[in-house]
Amino acid sequence: MATAIIAKPLPSLNGWVQPPTIPGHRPVPYLSHVGKGGKDALWVGFVVFLVSTLVVAVMMARQQKKYRGFHLLTMLVAGIATLSYYAMAVGSGSTYVKVGVREVQGQKTVDLRQIFWAREVDWALTTPLLLLELALLAGLPWLEIMSLLIVNEAMAATRLFSALHPGQAAAKWGWYAFSCLFLLGIFYMLIWNGRQCAQARPSSLSQLYTQLALYTIVLWLIYPIIFALGEGASCISSSAETIAYTILDIFAKAMFGLWLLARHKHDSAEESAMVLPESWTEPRGAKAGAIRLPGEED
């Protein structure tokens, strides 16, 4: 007796009906992943940040402990970036997100793009440290510093939500818009609040803050453009996106830190933007008191 074949409804994906499961003929997802050029860029980034970390460590060892604040922050930025780029270079810290449907060899298939969540984690950890350096250089009050860092974390979180949201849905661009708004808020604080506070500092600190703040704003403006062309609209390849991000990261993190350490006068209490109190640098002992942040009154 012949067995009846019962037709079942085929699953659909964005209006496309998936073809039957036939061995050797089932369409496989199209993977947009980082190629050789992108992988080479990741290894270059890893080496640059590793060397930067070691250079800053040597510079820090030559300073008195109370003048090592900026060195420590800069080394943390470079160290985190080193681990992030190593993770991406060896194939860790990434996932694939659906960005649409494309036709391959006459068949429609899902288009999956490689997204490095390790880069987003890197941003969430390093950008507040970079902003903290600028804020301390300008002499911002601690309440405004906390506000600046909170806005930054909101920017990083919404950027991550946008990157991981599948397809080209309005929600993806909605998260992107929120991230851009938070980024504009950061720029406003740096330009308005930061500049006002920096004007009350010694001229050397004020000039250095203005230069580094403008340098940071110009570089950070490029990130959302690359994001929109890459993770957003998939107009550029994953390798091109990775190369662009690597170049930007080197200038926005490694070069920023080395510029700050080279120009800032760390050995002068009058012209140093951050002098750590003794309770932060020496053993506290039996007569230890409360830890006080720089600028606080006794």
Image: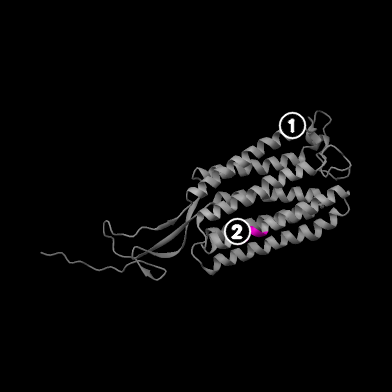
Residue indicated by mark 1 = 61
Residue 121 coordinates in the image, percent (x, y): 59, 50
Q: Quadrant of residue 84?
A: top right
Dot 2 crowding, Cα within 10 Å, few <14, some 14–19, many 20+: many
Tell me what residue is drawn at x 76 percent, y 50 percent: 134
| Residue 68 seen by the camera | yes
* Image quadrant where residue 15 sits: bottom left
| Residue at the bottom extreme, as displayed | 15
Q: Nearer the viewer, residue 195 or 207?
A: 207
Q: Amino acid at mark 1?
A: Ala
Quadrant the N terminus occupies: bottom left
x and y, in percent, of residue 285 in the image = 80, 28
* Residue at mark 1 to residue at mark 2: CA–CA distance: 36 Å
Position of the C terminus, as image quadrant, is top right
- Give the amino acid at mark 2: Arg
In the image, which disc is placed on residue 4?
none
Classify 10 Å Cα crowding around label 1: few (below 14), some (14-19), many (20 and above).
few
Q: What residue is disc 2 on? A: 159
- Residue 290: give x, y in percent of width and height: 82, 38
Q: Which residues are magenta?
A: 221-226
Q: Is residue 123 visible?
A: no
In front: label 1 or label 2 = 1
Dominant SS of magenta comes to helix
Provide the secondary structure element on which disc 2 rests.
helix
